[in-house]
Amino acid sequence: MNNSNNIIEELLNKAKEAFESKDYEKSIEYIDEVIFYNGDSYDLYHNRGLAKLNLCLYEEAVKDFDRAIELGDYNSYYDRGLAKFYMAFYKEAIEDFNKFIELDKNSTASFAYNTIGLCKYNLGEFDEALKYYDKAIEINPNLIIAYHNISLLKHSIGLDDEALSYLNKALEAEPDNIETYLKNIFYKI
């Protein structure tokens, strides 16, 4: 391995360490250097986009995810959808999540279905939101956040008994989840 490869490898390791320690600014700096020395790679743009997403730099994150997609990274559709979701561009986010679902060959589609449900909820389309939450649970019965989201939806339309039943289902799936336990107590009060 030549000196240039050693430098790039070292920068990549530093970027990863910085990201894992939540020093996203530093992670971005290291990735910028690798892009300068090493050129385009969808992993670099995707990872820099994730760091920007964690810093709430949503527009900048979208640009990085756009570039990662151009370079062939379908996983960036999901993360670009999240950035759009956080910017309240729900319909655009849904398009990205649907594209991710179309291309995803793993069980991670459950997260996309759940987040489409959140988009639909925020658009006031409660029946549609419920369908997407249910689909997420169908794919991954242990996706606790989907049960929480159904509970929130049911509570927001005054169906507290149904909201409580979904929290109980979440507790069945993950009995030690303190957040679910506390919400369960809240709905009983």
Image (spheres, rainbow, N blue to C red):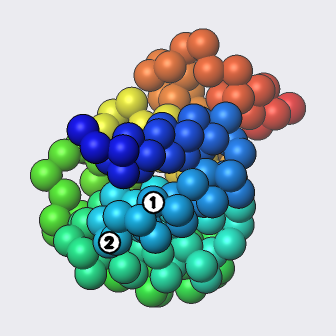
Farthest residue in the front direction? 3
Which residue is pictured at 50% across the width and 19% down the height?
174
Task: Relative to 98, say whether 7 is above or below.
Answer: above
Which residue is pictured at 16% across the width and 65% down the height?
103
Q: Residue 161, percent across and down?
A: 64, 41
Residue 182 position by quadrant: top right
Disc tally is 2
Q: Amino acid at mark 2?
A: Asp
Q: Is residue 12 left or right of residue 103?
A: right
Mark 1 or mark 2: whose residue is earlier in sequence: 1
On-image quarter of the N terminus: top left
Task: Relative to 143, say whether 175 is above or below.
Answer: above
The residue at which mark 2 appears reads as 40
Q: How busy is the neighbourhood of tag 2: few (under 14 within 10 Å), some, or many (20 plus)?
A: some
| Element class at badge 1 | helix
On-image quarter of the C terminus: top right
**In the depicted view, which residue is nearer to us: 45 or 73?**
45
Q: How busy is the neighbourhood of tag 1: few (under 14 within 10 Å), some, or many (20 plus)?
A: many
Asked if residue 39 shows in the view, the reply is yes
| Element class at badge 2 | loop
Farthest residue in the right direction? 189
The residue at which mark 1 appears reads as 34
Residue 133 position by quadrant: bottom left
Q: Amino acid at mark 1?
A: Val
Measured in 3D between alpha carbons, the distance from the residue under mark 1 to the one under mark 2, in whole angstroms, is 9 Å
**In the depicted view, which residue is nearer to us: 58 or 156?**
58
